Amino acid sequence: MRTIGIVATLALLSAGHAAAQSWSPPSPEQRCPSQWGAADERGAANLQTPAQVLKAAQLVRTGEVIELGRVLETGIPLFGTRRFDMHTKRTGPALGSNRRRSNEELVITEIGQVGTQFDMFSHQTIDSSLYNCIDSDAVGTRNGFTKLGVEKIGTLFTRGVLIDVAASKGVDMLEQGYEITVADLEAALAKQGMSVQRGDAVLIHTGWGKLWGVDNAKYNAGCPGIGAPAAEWLAKHDVMLLGSDNFPVEVSPNPDKTLSLPVHQIALVVNGIFLLENMKLDELAAKRVHEFAFAVQPLKVKGGTGSTVAPVAIH
Ligand code: UVW
């Protein structure tokens, strides 16, 4: 019977039938309204209660602040047609008897989607539908999104957890295209003696960040990262944010060739969970700081789809 089944499968494939899709977006009825109500635009930011902030503050024990943001400069890896160009503006001649001059700069960039970047819910859709089934075409204007703009979020301060999957697997860097599974997350957490809690900022160390500024072409060509089952598992834990040391947080390309960045949809569209991409996680990993107070403050770009940011871990 098994042989017949395999032969039948091969026959179907050779007849041009694609293998079953491994993840499908839930219907609007299944995902809307969100758990925070039909009018909500802040998603998992709602998990930041005063109690959650106080709990995170208690994780500050040494006073060390570890930077998790990349330096914005010419030559950073950029996705697609994104760019970062800086032009200095210098004034002269010197003014006044005190001979004062000024320096400033004009930066040409996608301020929401370069460097270490915070993805807001207006960034991704399922067809034209955003988080909470808001119609992207109805809220997208020439001057930004009238709903789900990044200015709605403000400072996030919560418990941060580093899940060091690379260390758990005994490697410096996971391979391109390696899909981090639920079992991988559970194994790494068990080794660290930790669990994921409601409202956490969960940061996943793959080691891929070693390529940043060293081999930008390889960095952007693909990466290891979580797949759809791991993202859904984390979403079930009601996390606030998912971050990683790669460009999309998730595995790329997805091992299921029919899918395009499904974790973006699972996090941003279905569950209202923020993504934090291109993080600098090497110092946290090297110092084995796995639990800390995490802080990030997206720029208040009205109607913006995201923000370049400089998050920190304080422990
Ligand atoms: C896309 O915009 C597709 O990617 P990212 O959110 O990873 O920048």
Image (cartoon, grey):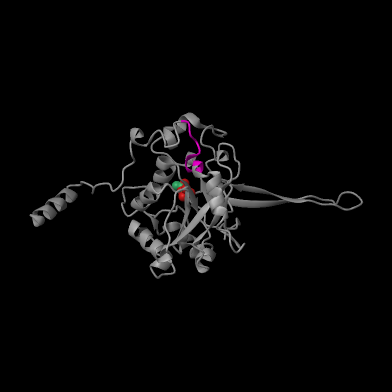
Per the image, is 44 magenta? yes
Residue at the extreme right of the image, as rendered: 97
Q: Quadrant of the C terminus?
A: bottom right
Per the image, is 137 magenta? no
Could you say which quadrant of the image residue 58 lies in? bottom right
- Residue 178 is left or right of residue 210, and the answer is left
Q: Is residue 14 visible?
A: yes
Q: Position of residue 107 (x, y in %)?
A: 64, 48
Looking at the image, how many numbered discs can be counted on the residues? 0
Could you say which quadrant of the image residue 62 lies in? bottom right
Residue toward you, 179 or 254:
179
Q: Which residues are magenta?
A: 39-46
Residue at 57 percent of width and 54 percent of height: 57
Q: Quadrant of the N terminus?
A: bottom left
Q: Position of residue 179 (x, y in %)?
A: 35, 58
Residue toward you, 70 or 90:
70
Residue at 44 percent of width and 49 percent of height: 198
Q: Position of residue 184 (x, y in %)?
A: 36, 61
Residue at the extreme left of the image, as rendered: 1
Could you say which quadrant of the image residue 167 lies in? bottom left
Residue 3 higher or lower than 149, as above or below: below
Residue 63 higher or lower than 117, as above or below: below
